[in-house]
Amino acid sequence: MKLLFKQRAFSWLDSYDVFDEQGNPVYIVKGQLSWGHCLKIFDANNNYVGMVKQKILTWLPAFEIYIGETYMGRISKEFSFFKPKYNIEYNGWHVEGDWFEWDYNIINSSGYNVANISKELWNWTDTYTIEVGKPEDALAALMLVLAIDAEKCSRD
């Protein structure tokens, strides 16, 4: 399954649209006014499905992941040289990125590649392609991309 994750231009808060391969809307991400990043995710019918919320006052950036109202885990940046790494306290996954921080792989505890994330260059706004092996992992992969993008925006 392939998703295109695109930031909305000229938005005061973090807002994104997520489309499938045919260009159909799958998810809508709406930023909420709060301390740190708070991104609420809605399906194509505008039903709330989850949230990514930044933890404040942590040594390295960290984000909590909620499916519906249920806390599922957290993603936090790990200290690393050269290539960014993130620890995910959800499904036993971890994320590894390249030197430029444009491409990432989500890998499960068995070493299986859950998803590939690639930043599309030459766009006005942040745009990513998310390739997920199993459709049921798409929402969790999207949440990780949102957290990584929010962490990168916090550094700029």
Image (spheres, rainbow, N blue to C red):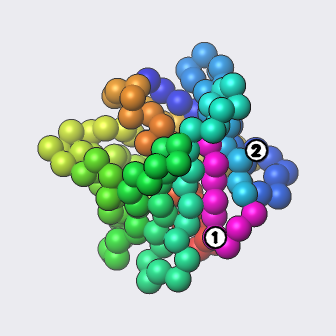
Q: Which residue is mark 1?
A: 36
Q: Are marks 1 and 2 in contact (CB under 8 Å)?
A: no
As shown in the figure, which amino acid type bears the numbered disc 2?
Arg
Query: Foreground residue, 60 or 10?
Result: 60
> Residue drawn at (69%, 25%), measured in percent from left and top?
45
Query: Foreground residue, 96 or 54?
Result: 54
Few, some or many residues within 10 Å of mark 1 (<14, 14–19, 20+)? some
Going by the image, does 117 lie left or right of 86?
right
As shown in the figure, which amino acid type bears the numbered disc 1?
Gly
Query: Counting residues from the N terminus, which is met first, the one under dot 1 or under dot 2?
Result: 2
* Count of number-bearing discs: 2
Going by the image, does 130 lie left or right of 18?
left
Magenta residue check for 95: no
> Residue drawn at (41%, 61%), measured in percent from left and top?
75
Q: Quadrant of residue 123?
A: top right
Asked if 20 appears above or below 7 in the picture, the reply is: above
Which quadrant would the C terminus be assigned to in this image? bottom right
Magenta residue check for 39: yes
> Residue drawn at (40%, 25%), measured in percent from left and top?
135
Query: Foreground residue, 68 or 77?
Result: 68
Asked if 155 appears above or below 18 in the picture, the reply is: below
Q: Which residue is mark 2?
A: 8
Q: Quadrant of residue 27?
A: top right
Residue, far top = 22
Picture coordinates of residue 124, whole percent (x, y): 74, 47
Start-end of magenta stretch: 33-41
Which quadrant would the N terminus be assigned to in this image? top left
Picture coordinates of residue 5, whole percent (x, y): 60, 38
Q: CA distance from mark 1 to mark 2?
A: 19 Å
